[in-house]
Image (tube, rainbow, N blue to C red):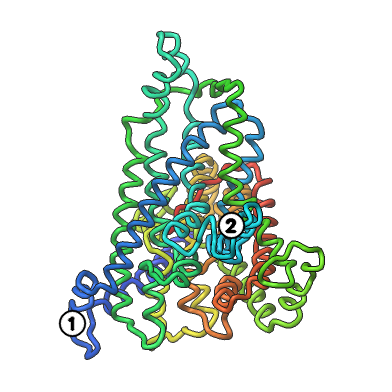
Amino acid sequence: MARRRFDPSAPIFALFALLLAILVFLPMGWLAVFSVRGPDGAATLTYFAQLVTDDEMVRPLIVTLIVATSVSTLCTLVATPMAWLIARTDMPFARPIRLLVMASFVTPPFLGAVAWEILAAPNSGLINQVYRLAFGLGRSDRLIDIYTVYGLILAIANYTFPYVFILVANGLDRIPSDLEDASSILGASRWRTAARITVPLVLPAIVAGTLIAFLQAMNNFGSPAIIALPAGFHTMTTKIWSMFQYPPQPGMAAAAAVPLLAVTIMLLHLQRAALGRRSYAVVGGKGAQARIIRLGWLRWAALAYCGAVVSAAVIFPYIALILTAFAKTLTITWAPEGFGLGNFEFVFFEFSSTKPALWNTMLLGVMAATAGTAVTLIIAYVTSRQAVPGHRVLGFLATAPIAIPGIVFGVGLFFAYTHPPLVLYGTLTIMFIAFLTTELPIGYQQFQAAFRGIHIELEEASRILGATRLRSLRDIVAPLITTAVVSTWCFIFIAAIRELSAAVLLYTANTKVLSVVIYDLNENGELGAIAVLGLLMLAVTFAVVAVAYRLPRATSIPTSA
């Protein structure tokens, strides 16, 4: 009787399940413990009571809700018609506008906030300088002040609207024109067709985009840290960060993180419900190409509208960063002698934090992207092929970090790894764990889409010939998803090098990354150095995006908070 070969697939898959459980649940478990543990070690609900009774905690919560609601509403009102204009009309330069929207999407929000600080600071802001020069006004006059709640809403919305735009544009692209043509044949006007056919079909994408925009604004740390703190007010994320300053309040920080986590989970559930509403599903085969609406002379007005949006999000901020990088003084003088390479010399040759921060950023980005790609490849394969019992649990664990805001996860990691037996605080390892875990959903979503396009019969034939699941994955599946592997690696790398929310709670003097260095420089008013480092980060990001963009595969947009 032939001896059965040992198949290591099951124990390896079980090991990955255990790894995921530790990565996700250990920090959240410690977060829960500290939220109900008093200074004396006894159980207490005092921290949660303080959340709703202490004015110092209630005000940031109210500001956060106002900002998140305003940003999501503004993004929906701006991005929805913009997506329709680009996807369904003959508006000129639609492709460059799409590319600029993607540039806004990959721009770190904290860097965008710095750029708008350069543009709209009340005294030195470029917009206010031009405004005073144009109308001969005094130094106290200003057109816009970024250090207000309204300025914060503007700064966050500029780098949040792409979530709504991409979802709505993709939804419009998937609607076959047959349905709209049938409506027109039956006598419906263009606007009635849009109201009865187009809008209902794309409504789930609009709702999902609005919810994602709300989550992104609510859980954003970088922009409020750049704009709200100098203005003298807090959001919940900056308030949680402040509780780790002297004197530290870890229990209060843990309790304050719980509402952000709860709201995020609830809204993500609503998002899935919106995307999964069967009453709005398209039934039938592949439709004809979407019908393009002729705008006539209005297409130039449409271009002006879209141009204004991408100018606020990309063109003006990038110009501000470039000018500041070359400016010799904090206030740009516009004279040729006011520009030079001093900031570049300072950053690359005099500033001691640049090289270690750049090394840490690249090292952590490569490690997180490589490990994240490997882990999510295995998990997505197991769940898509239902290879082991409990595969649904694996899928849940791989997507669970979506529901954990970065600042909340940073708090959980701080608690989890500052106690024996695993004390990792102050090392690059804890940063690696943070980057890896928060970006798991990106890779999982990418590979799930890739495995759906590969028929299982190829693997079954390999198994019949005696190959293990791991051998089939290596020899049969892996060569077919090479493009997905590369694009997933690129997405995780980009997300990792721009991470600030968790990093700002976990770094030490020896483990700084570029995002943290930029944040520290902003506190010291070193805008020239920030601009140089920001342009360096953007250059790396766009180089990686260029690689991913050339890959012939449609990629999904991550919705991690």
Cα distance in 3D space between marks 2 and 1: 43 Å
Residue positioned 35% across, 46% down in the render: 271
Residue 5 lies, in percent from the top left, at: 49, 61
**Circle 2 — which element?**
loop
- The quadrant where residue 400 appears: bottom left
Query: Is residue 191 rendered to the left or right of residue 518?
Result: left
Residue 180 lies, in percent from the top left, at: 45, 18
Residue positioned 40% across, 62% down in the render: 219
Tell me if mark 1 has few (under 14), some (14-19) or many (20+) residues whose alpha carbon lies within 10 angstroms of its own: few
Residue type for callout 1: Ala
Tell me if mark 2 has few (under 14), some (14-19) or many (20+) residues whose alpha carbon lies within 10 angstroms of its own: many
Question: Where residue 189 is drawn, which disc sits there?
Answer: none
Do the residues under discs 2 and 1 have CB atoms within 8 angstroms? no
Between 188 and 387, the one lying in front of the other is 188
Question: Considering only vertical position in the picture, is 372 above or below 445?
Answer: below
Residue type for callout 2: Thr
Residue 305 lies, in percent from the top left, at: 56, 37
The residue indicated by pointer 2 is 107
Between 197 and 487, the one lying in front of the other is 197
Residue positioned 47% across, 72% down in the render: 230
Residue 399 in sight in this render: yes
**Circle 1 — which element?**
loop
Of the numbered discs 2 and 1, the one sitting upstream in the chain is 1
User: Which marked residue is nearer to the observer: mark 2 or mark 1?
Assistant: 2
Question: Considering only vertical position in the picture, is 91 above or below 6?
Answer: above
Q: Residue furthest bottom?
A: 40
The residue indicated by pointer 1 is 43
Q: Residue furthest right?
A: 337
Residue 53 lies, in percent from the top left, at: 20, 72
